[in-house]
Amino acid sequence: MTTMLGPGSGRARPERVARPGPHPIGSPARGHREQRRRPGPVVPVMFDGNRPAWLVLGYQELHHVLNNPEIFTSDPRHRSRQVSVSPDWAPLPGVGRRQSLLRTDGDEHQRRYQAIDDVLGEVDVFLLRARAETVTDSVIDKFAGLGAADLIGAFAHQVPALVLASLCGPDDDPEVDQIADDLVDLVDLVEPGADAADGHHGLVEQLRVLLDDRLDEPGDDIISHLVEHPAEITDDEIVEDLAVVLGFGMRTVAGWIGNSLRLLLTDGSFALELSGGRRSVMQAITRVLWEDTPMQVVAGRWATRDVQLGGQRIRAGDMVALGVAAANSDPRVGAGRSPGPAGSCPAAAAAGGANTHTAAGAAATGSGGSTAAAAGANSAHLSFGHGTHRCPFPAQEIAEVITRTAVEVLLDRLPNVQLAVPADALVWRRTAWNRALTALPVRFSPV
Ligand code: HEM
């Protein structure tokens, strides 16, 4: 289950909070949400009805949490015994199982993060773009003659699964094909009631099969490169960390593609003519990271000691969830209003350019920083996280290449694509973690 009840208000300890209001975070009632009183920067919430946590909504507070892993650790062994959050709880394996790099800190994390960073950094972006184009074309071919499609199920879920799987080996390898199928299954498992732990299990098992193959016969793929990496990553670590790379990448990129297409198809300020198409695409995908970021809440920090945060007293062992989407729109720092030029996208950061677009390029504000100072310094969203666990820069670039290519090729192939239902009939998935549509029905001239 990934249902999350809405935040309560006031200063109660999380376990004393009564069942909060009826709107789950991430519900489609965005306009209504803005009309309601904005909650404080850190609020007690109840996940799945019985898992108390603190949800960090303020930009400065979130920045502070991410900057201080020794106080807010990613290692669930620090959780309080009273808090029944097991490592098998759906949102945790959904983003990385027990022993993945997501759930480690310190030197061990640094060793594994560096290996992933290096291996993803070796991905040739030009080849990746070419691969993404080929994949996108083949996916579109399946529905281009029909004149109608659901761009979530038939497109946004298919393209990243096939492109990310191809990082694991040649696309004519049936084992690689199976990875793509597992990724599509995984992204379908974010609805309440679905067992994300089971979904993750299939991916992990398939990665084990592929790892065995690569140990026998290495190739030019991320699995073989991890095996050969000087950090001497163990087989179990390779499997767990690759499950994070692929699982995380899949959910986020699928959401990024879907939310960008929604924006382009529903916002009149984006012209879809071929002439202006590419610039519009860059603007749209950048704006989505501010306004409809695909991972709106990230699970999993635990306080290592009693600490004050955003006016709340967090006790050692309490769980802290990262409200990325809320922080991006925090009015106290003026965030979320400027999508920025195309050149400030993740690719620029990955290329080592000045990056004012992600938190990596923002001045640290900490919880003690003044609002004015933060407002002056900040032009960065937190969609890719920040600090030691931030989304590796090569991963950000891979995400951007897949998303941009998918959207551009779709608009090139189906220039008169348009929504087949009124914009307000589109339905968001009922989950606190991801912001993603259930479907995006469109029509177009068959080609
Ligand atoms: C729109 C696309 C993406 C978004 C919004 C995104 C967001 C994030 C965020 C917020 C984190 C930090 C999690 C935390 O602090 O606990 C993260 C970590 C990570 N991301 Fe991404 N991500 C995206 C795409 C990708 C892709 C495509 C890959 C792989 C190819 C990837 C690989 C990773 C990995 C391995 C980590 C874990 C780092 C760690 O725990 O040390 N991400 N991502």
Image (cartoon, rainbow, N blue to C red):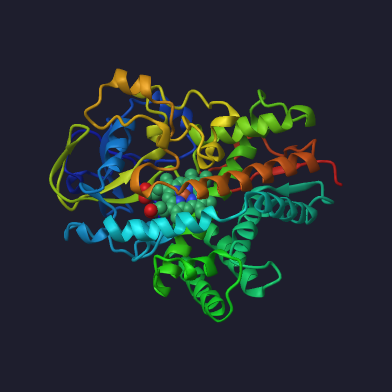
Looking at the image, which residue is at 42% across and 74% down? Answer: 235
Left or right? Give the position of 8 relative to 163: left
Location of residue 36 in the rendering, given as x and y in whole percent from the top left corner: 37, 26
Location of residue 268 in the rendering, given as x and y in whole percent from the top left corner: 67, 24
Looking at the image, which residue is at 65% across and 44% down? Answer: 440
Left or right? Give the position of 32 relative to 311: right
Q: Residue furthest front?
A: 230
Camera-side residue: 50 or 90? 90
Camera-side residue: 182 or 230? 230
Camera-side residue: 143 or 212? 212
Looking at the image, which residue is at 29% across and 21% down? Answer: 371
The N terminus, quarter of image: bottom left
Location of residue 173 in the rendering, given as x and y in whole percent from the top left corner: 67, 73
Q: Quadrant of residue 323?
A: top left
Looking at the image, which residue is at 39% across and 30% down? Answer: 362
Location of residue 179 in the rendering, given as x and y in whole percent from the top left corner: 58, 67
> Residue 434: in sight, yes or no?
no
Relative height, residue 303 to residue 422 (above, below):
below
Q: Residue furthest right?
A: 447
